[in-house]
Amino acid sequence: MLAEKEGFEPPDLLQSTVFKTAAFDRSAISPRDDAILQLIGNFLLETRLQQNKSQVEIAKASGINRSTVIQLEDGGGTLTSFIKVIRSLNQLEILENLKIKSEMSPLQLAKMNQQKRQRASRKSQDISTNKPNW
C-alpha cells in the first residue's frame, strides 16, 4: 500500500484547496457530478434560447456579469448566480421539489381526527331569562 512507502503522507482533505477556497477544482468532481452540472448548464442555455434572450440580457436582468452566465451554462458558477439567473428566466418553480413537505404520521392523523368536534354542544339556557326584547 502507499501508506507503507517511505515518506508518504495521506492528504489532509480539510487542508486541501477545495475546502479553503470558494472556487473548487473541477477535476475533484466525479464524472457523475460533472454530468449533473452540465445538465443544469444545458437547462439554462436552452431556456434562455427558447425565450430568445441573449447572455447580456440575462446578465443585466440578473445583476451579474456575462462571463458568469457563460460559466453557468458551461456547468460552473455559484448557487447564488444560478438562483439569480433562473429568477430572471422565470423558472423558480424548478425549485419546488426542494421544499420539505411535512407529512403527518398515521398516529398523528388519528389523534387529530379524534380531537375534531363531531357536533355542537348544547347550551343550557334558562327559558325565563331568555325573553324577547320587543
Image (cartoon, rainbow, N blue to C red):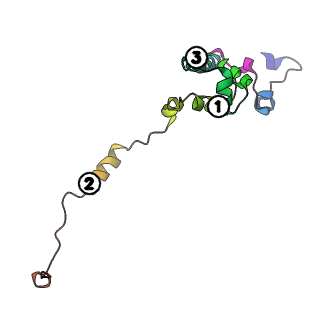
Q: Residue furthest bottom?
A: 128
Name the residue that disc number 1 marks.
61
Q: Is residue 84 magenta?
A: no
Task: Find residue 101 and report its image quarter.
Answer: top left
- Where disc 1 sits, the SS reads helix
Task: Give the mark nearer the N terminus: 3 vs 1.
Answer: 3
Residue at (65, 17) in percent of width and height: 34
The quarter holding residue 74 reads top right
Image point 40% across, 41% down: which residue? Answer: 103
Give the image location of residue 119, x and y in percent: 18, 60
Q: Is residue 126 left or right of residue 67?
A: left
- Distance, label 2 to label 1, CA atoms, is 52 Å
Q: Which residue is mark 3?
A: 49
Q: Amino acid at mark 3?
A: Leu
Between 82 and 9, the one nearer to me in the picture: 82
Query: Dot 2, how many residues are within 10 Å of its Cα: few (below 14), some (14-19), or many (20+)?
Result: few
| Amino acid carrying mark 2 in the image | Gln
**Is the residue under label 1 in contact with that under label 3 (CB below 8 Å)?**
no
Q: Which residue is mark 2?
A: 114
- Mark earlier in primary sequence (2, 1): 1
Tag 3 and tag 2, C-beta contact below 8 Å: no
Start and end of the magenta stretch?
23-31
Question: Residue 133 has which mark?
Answer: none
